[in-house]
């Protein structure tokens, strides 16, 4: 199998760093270009000392994010750029016939109107919204296989959607009842020099933010609506927690009918029994982010509460792997026909 | 004003430590006895180097928890003992005419049956349950004034009850809709040598536990039912978070009728406008545990979600102060007729 | 006793925040002005929600740092400004007859040449260097009593000087042998929006910096030289550690003659036996920053190593209290004739 | 190449966990047995949920640590047992012709007398001390190739020895001058249910321990003496720091003659220029544990201080990888003739 040639555009943030790590070590991919305005000229080893042990880390240098130059070198471009910037970079890569896997929010929604409502500016390439595929492999694998433009899901949405969609599809829960309470590590805020994310502002702190209308609600609701085949409005509260990585989501759901623990288990087993990255927790275990950090796995556990009648579902994932770069590589594996777990743990 | 003489029975855990700190520095209280089986003979300064700067820390030595001896020395006894142990210690103090302020769960419930359901053993002094007063000053101040036996509330319950009770009393929310999602620092688990609470097991971890029927639900539901004047069953999910101190609770509530942000504000203002330890957040602020750690304050913030119709209320407190020892001292101040804020910040 | 009127100029950083806390609660001081360019117009409660429970926190508003206005209101000005900025602010306060207690490095050195060598620019008020007193109360108490301008010591220097000076004065150690290895919490870097101090860059990291010539060496060496009555050149290596507050310094010292553990103890007892904020550790105890954080105490412990002949001395303090704001208040207490421990724990 | 069959005896601690991770994914090794008294009967996936994604994690079950049974199944046994216990397990494996790689301190010293001095009990298999090889590949690679019994070095010793030995061998530093100041993450204390290692006792704390004669000094001094060809007595101070993983060591060394930065660089380049796991830092970089955690790399940086004449050398490694399990696998690779980097990053 010929190795696919890969570029990472905007590789200096936390998810860019994890992408570099995964693609440097991927058996069927060859990282040939990394771009970053502020790191131009530096080697991977200089920017990310952690990877200095990799033989290629001293050979690969960051270049200017010049799409025209980069398109000629690669088969696949990963965009790890800020929201709003990715859209313009995607066009030249797509025109040159490259597959584009975008980690930003720019192509995750089908509706430019909803995009504008949540992101407060017009979409710069609305035509592409129709062509993009929402890169949640466990849900959209068949469409991903044929996609040229992948909108890789957000970290919070992944933690909410994977536990919820099978229940909605099987009609086990009331769509209007969905409440998602999420906890995120600080890397979710990106590598940005802002006071709010200083060590002393985050350490020994727990705090909600973005209440009640966080941007990620837009893609959460669009995907839930698809699964429910009706418009879903959801409740979502993110919190900032002093860990580097991880998302823990607790979902409060009302059953659509009387449910048993076994029916829930059967629903999840049917949906995810063969999924390599979904870990359904049995017995007494409950999700813990420390069990998934550094991996592409999502842990899902659940409890029916006989006292309230509610179904409590909990999920844990690494916001930078299954919630970002690992999931993006998983989509690449599917598009390229590689084993879906290639280069991922 | 004569200083009240105080004993702390079982002063070697985290809430015992904070009690020592508060009572050593209290303007109207004189700490005269501290007991601890394992620390007998040691001075306060030896067990808690942090207080070694206090003049009395070298004079006060831990004694055996011999109630008969201690009762003769003091006016007030704080019990900072494990659940199930406090009940037996309370009796000799009460018989000797001392006020007892218990920080355990032993006297928080009125019903021995509910106690047994949640704590899995018979209550050892069921008659005292009728005499005890639930020590939540903002709700039960008048009863606390006359109490001889205070059951100081749990940390989670305080964070749930203070934001919820005014809404229930004013009929603004549906009692059956209450969902409380809580995050706790690790000191909430006590100073216990268990693998689960080792640094490496907690650091870089976020995890739920005790789902769906944590023991604290019993006192939460009893107090909510009192406020609602009907039986309330609530949803409560605790999570363990890598901070030393703090509880952050996010409440999901369904309005009983169409509500405005102003009506919610008016309800809270009426209930807590003059409360020295309740901080109602205005404007854009949301609760953050780092703003309350080390103080007896609880921060309460809220948002009505026009999209879902739900009312989201968030609270932050220090589990060892407002959630335990500070609140216990607040009850003491009330009982003794001291200014309610004496010795507290 | 009339309360002294106090201004804090530049009160928005971490040590400014602790100064506000200490002075709001000081029995003999009245905080009347706080300045901060970015917070002008806001109340203390708005900028520091943690102090919102204090009655004055809603009455005191930040003003522009206009020295002419502020000088008329106060007896004492604390300057909590960046290095290089404090010098210009000191002049109008001194001219108006106010006592100035400066927390920056601007007045800590006697020599403008050494200042320029370490701080890379000319000193803006070199004449004041002669008038300033280095505010280390345990060493310079008599001079502090009469001072109008206090240069409050740096956090690292305090942790190095207090354990070392008595040994030097008594001729117990070789001056050329002093090696100080120091660990600091992240608040030592100030509240600055820089990538290096983001949560994810500090958490799960341990790193040296400023090797081998950190700026604090200048004041360390000047004070060591004074004590040794000869020029001392010292080794000093700071490290950044993921805690909010605290400094732990380990000193490696060569005895000037054969020493016993008792002789070292006697030296320290003579120097610090009556000092309220110096805690000499006996028995098996070694310093731990968690025993001093939030207090003005410094813990000092020591071991003679019979195998190498070296004396190992270890100290722990809170960089924002004994290492900054607490020590500054201690100097104020001395100047004003208050009890030295007033408002401090 | 036939895969080597591997057992891990005592695989339930932190270094056992990392061994499992490395050997599950090793290209030339097949993990066939893991033992643990308390986990007997459980699968790898149950004990270490983090590895549940690996296909073998549900097939491999923990067995009783019955050496006679296990010896028949394997070519190589890794012992991840407490100090003092490993010695007895080694004998049956060696008798059965297995290679033994021991991660405890039991075989690291040549002298049973020194062992007794530092470990306070007689060695249970003193004859084996002569046969064991100290598994520091960069120093003893040739002996490792032929060894049947590897004593894999301690985490602190690795961080001290690799930066120091080349300088000693080349006569660049005075052997009597070596001072090692080390910081360790809490996993270094092992997975033990002790109060000292609870989250709340370690978080927001920095503290020295084991001063001045920590057990690891014995192997540090034996190896330094070998390199210096004379008896070396060293100074070593460990500190406990609130991170999960990592060791940062700062060395204070006196040059044996006038040195330049280039001579030091040349010495290190000669020693380690071709070493895959030693990263010599150039330019302004200094070691940071976050650059090595999760890898088998050690970072080494250095500065000559023109003011004091001392050479400051700093190193960073992951205590569980290069300081324990990764280094043990590196030795296995050498013994078996695999590429030395196989299965390691």
Image: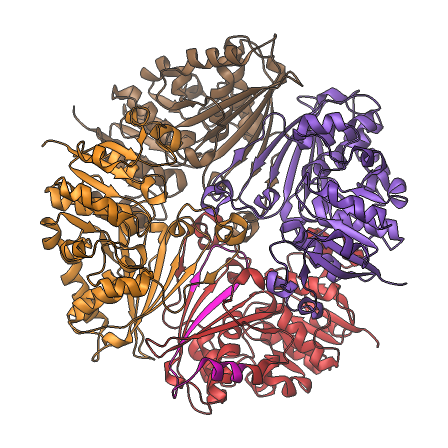
Chain colours: A purple, B brown, C orange, D red
In the image, B150 versus B160, the foreground residue is: B160
Q: Is residue B52 visible?
A: no
Quarter that holds the C terminus of chain C: top left
On the image, the x and y values in percent for residue B126 come to: 46, 22
In the image, B21 versus A134, the foreground residue is: A134
Tell me which residue sits at (84%, 77%) in the image: D1
On the image, the x and y values in percent for residue C302 come to: 28, 66
- Which residue is the extreme one toward the bottom? D229
Tell me which residue sits at (79%, 57%) in the image: A6
Tell me which residue sits at (45%, 73%) in the image: D215
Tell me which residue sits at (80%, 30%) in the image: A110
B228 shown above or below C92: above
- Left or right, residue B47 beside residue D90: left
Quarter that holds the N terminus of chain C: top left
On the image, the x and y values in percent for residue B233 come to: 61, 18
Q: Magenta segment range?
A: D239-268
> Magenta includes D260?
yes
- Left or right, residue A66 beside residue D156: right
Q: Toward which corner of the image does residue B139 lie, by quadrant? A: top left
On the image, the x and y values in percent for residue C42 come to: 37, 28
B29 shown above or below D332: above
Q: Toward which corner of the image does residue D150 lie, by quadrant? A: bottom right
Q: How many marks can you see? A: 0
C156 shown above or below C5: below
- Left or right, residue B252 beside residue D212: right
Q: Is residue A4 visible?
A: yes
- Left or right, residue B266 beside residue B39: right
In the image, D299 versus B63, the foreground residue is: D299
> Magenta includes B112?
no
């Amino acid at each position: 199998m010929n190795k696919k040639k890969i570029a990472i555009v905007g590789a200096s943030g936390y998810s860019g760093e994890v992408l570099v790590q995964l693609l440097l070590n991927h058996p069927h991919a060859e990282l040939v270009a990394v771009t970053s305005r502020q790191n131009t000229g530096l080697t991977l080893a200089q920017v990310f000392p952690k990877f200095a042990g990799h033989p290629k880390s001293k050979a690969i240098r960051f270049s200017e994010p010049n799409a025209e130059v980069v398109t000629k070198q690669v088969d696949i471009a990963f965009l790890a750029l800020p929201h709003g910037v990715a859209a313009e970079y995607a066009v030249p890569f797509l025109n040159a016939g490259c597959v584009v896997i975008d980690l930003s929010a720019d192509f995750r929604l089908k509706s430019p109107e909803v995009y504008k409502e949540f992101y407060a500016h017009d979409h710069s390439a609305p035509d592409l919204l129709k062509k993009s595929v929402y890169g949640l492999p466990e849900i959209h694998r068949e469409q991903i296989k044929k996609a040229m433009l992948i909108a890789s899901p957000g970290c919070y949405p992944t933690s909410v959607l994977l536990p919820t969609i099978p229940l909605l599809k099987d009609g086990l829960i009331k769509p209007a009842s969905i409440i998602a309470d999420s906890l995120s590590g600080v890397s979710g805020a990106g590598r940005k020099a802002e006071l709010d994310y200083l060590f002393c502002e985050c350490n020994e702190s727990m705090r909600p933010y973005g209440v009640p209308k966080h941007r990620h609600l837009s893609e959460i609701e669009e995907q839930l609506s698809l699964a429910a085949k009706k418009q879903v409005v959801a409740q979502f509260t993110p919190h900032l927690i002093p860990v580097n990585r991880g998302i823990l989501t607790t979902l409060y759901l009302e059953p659509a009918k009387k449910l048993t623990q076994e029916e829930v288990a059967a629903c999840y087993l049917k949906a995810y029994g063969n999924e390599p990255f979904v870990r359904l927790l049995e017995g007494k275990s409950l999700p813990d982010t420390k069990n998934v950090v550094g991996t592409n796995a999502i842990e899902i556990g659940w409890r029916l509460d006989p006292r309230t009648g509610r179904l409590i579902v909990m999920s844990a994932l690494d916001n930078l792997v299954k919630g970002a770069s690992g999931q993006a590589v998983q989509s690449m594996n599917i598009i390229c026909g590689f084993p879906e777990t290639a280069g991922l743990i």
